[in-house]
Image: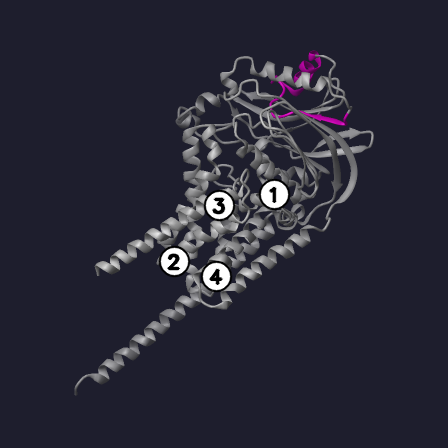
Amino acid sequence: MRNAATSTERRRSALVVAALIGGCVTPLAFAPTRWLPLIVVGPALGLWAAAQAKTGRAGAVYGALYGWSFSLLAFRWMFELDVVAGLVLPAIQGCFWAAIGAVAAVATRLKPGWWVCAVSATWTLTEATRARFPLSGFEWGQLSMATADVPVRQASAVVGALGVSGMLAAVAAGMAAVALGGGRRRWVPLAMSVGLIAATVGLGAVRWTAPDHGVAVTVVQVADPCPDAFAQDCPGYTAELLRRYVAGTRDLRTRPDLIVWGEDALPGADTLDEVGTRLAEVGDFLPAPLLAGAGTPTAPGRFLRWAALFDDDGTLLDGYAKRVPVPFGEYVPLRALLGGISQVGRLVPKDLEAGRDESPIVLRTNSGTARLGTVVSWEVTFSRAVRAVGTHANGLATLTTVASYSTSAAADQLLDAAQLRAAEHQKPMVVAATTGRSALIGPTGEMEATSALSRADRLTGTLHLRNGLTPYARFGELPVVLVAAVAALTVGIAWRRTTTADAGSSASASVVDDRRAADAMPR
């Protein structure tokens, strides 16, 4: 008995270690390390551990262990903002993988193909939920983010980043099924998953959008006036930031169609028209229209964050108000209760109000009209946020800062998200960061130019605008979610039938044993 108990404890310890290792190695597939094979190897380890659990509850524990270790390392850049945020966010996010672990454990009664289907469908639905809940959700960290620099990203034009993540989860589940053993047939789900990705990448390589005219763009990036400090702790930060932007723009050697500055590059005012007036007062330094970030108040303690387009004389041309605020970064939920926790109340003294308009920003040039589907900062990590402004656009843009993060992980991963958004729509994107990193991204998501991090830099290039809609832009994530839901329902029915059949077989075997025992009794 003691040997059996020891063996069971060793087995549990091994599964715990496998789940933790799987969660720890998966983030290494993301920027800046980009060890791409780990994007399926890591999840495969976690799924393998959960599949060997004897109950759904135990599987949920292994899934949560994978999720917590993954989230803690994948979102480690949050510690640069605040220790509490760096611990609380992974603690919440990691819980989502408990459902995946539970399904991986319970569905082992099914054949390998059904098991892979169950796990990948649950993974997809879990990611769709995580991207929307709690609060506005958190899409950062989907498996598809690791594919930004490889052709696999083109599949997102058909199924979106969510669909790519689901297919990668299917490959990982297929690998776990092979590791679990049971004959040659266990290779079939893995082969089918790889084939599905290959076919979707092929469809994504089709040019669903048509060429339009080009727009010459210059992105101006500045050095951080207060390195390793928050703007609230740096007197004169806004004025110095503007001075550096003006200096970096005044000596441009070319005249582009559009100049782009980063998020909150312009001093705030009561209205955007007043922002433009103050911009004109700085001097005659703009050789072209300017797209830049600014803030305006709406009510006491509330404000809007804009990506605003100004003519070269400071006249307001168009604007987009950020629609997806950052919880604890731009507003404090339940401020009266949570405002005093850590530095949140002090660093976020006012709450950002969500904008309403989804129209692209319109820029008219000599060569034609540019309709830029523009978002602000972390909105670019949400597929649905970019799709809302991108369906009627022929180009994409995002303004960000990344000033709070001095290492490259957050900046690089934000650019990966921007590449996926460009690939989803097959439209070019310009990323303008206050202090880095900025980028020019081509219509298929290829990186054309990037800036340095945390130092002054300039990018000049052409946005090759495109018209039309990809399948993802046309239908969004709904087809992927429906397919995953139908697959989960079908697997659930199959599992129930298998369970009922097993129960019936057990009952029949019990009756036979009882009869044999009765026959064996002396008469």
On residue 178, which mark appears?
4
Asked if residue 279 lies in the magenta stretch, the reply is yes
Query: In front here: 510 or 65?
Result: 65
Query: In front here: 61 or 30?
Result: 30
**Residue that numbered label 1 is attached to:** 148
What SS does tag 1 mark? loop
**Residue that numbered label 2 is attached to:** 52
Mark 2 Cα within 10 Å, few/some/many (few <14, many 20+)?
some
Q: Quadrant of residue 295?
A: top right
User: CB under 8 Å between callouts 3 and 4?
Assistant: no
What SS does tag 4 mark? helix
Instruction: Answer with mark 3 or mark 2, whichever residue precedes in sequence.
Output: 3
Instruction: Answer with mark 4 or mark 2, whichever residue precedes in sequence.
Output: 2
> What is the CA distance from the residue labelled 1 to the residue labelled 2?
33 Å
Residue type, numbered disc 2: Gln
Q: Tell me residue 495's x, y (percent).
A: 44, 64
> What is the CA distance from the residue labelled 1 to the residue labelled 4?
27 Å
Residue type, numbered disc 3: Thr
Instruction: Answer with mark 1 or mark 4, whichever residue precedes in sequence.
Output: 1
Q: Tell me residue 217's x, y (percent).
A: 73, 29
Residue type, numbered disc 4: Val
Rendered view: 488 above or below 299? below
**Residue at left 47%, top 45%?**
25
Residue type, numbered disc 1: Ala
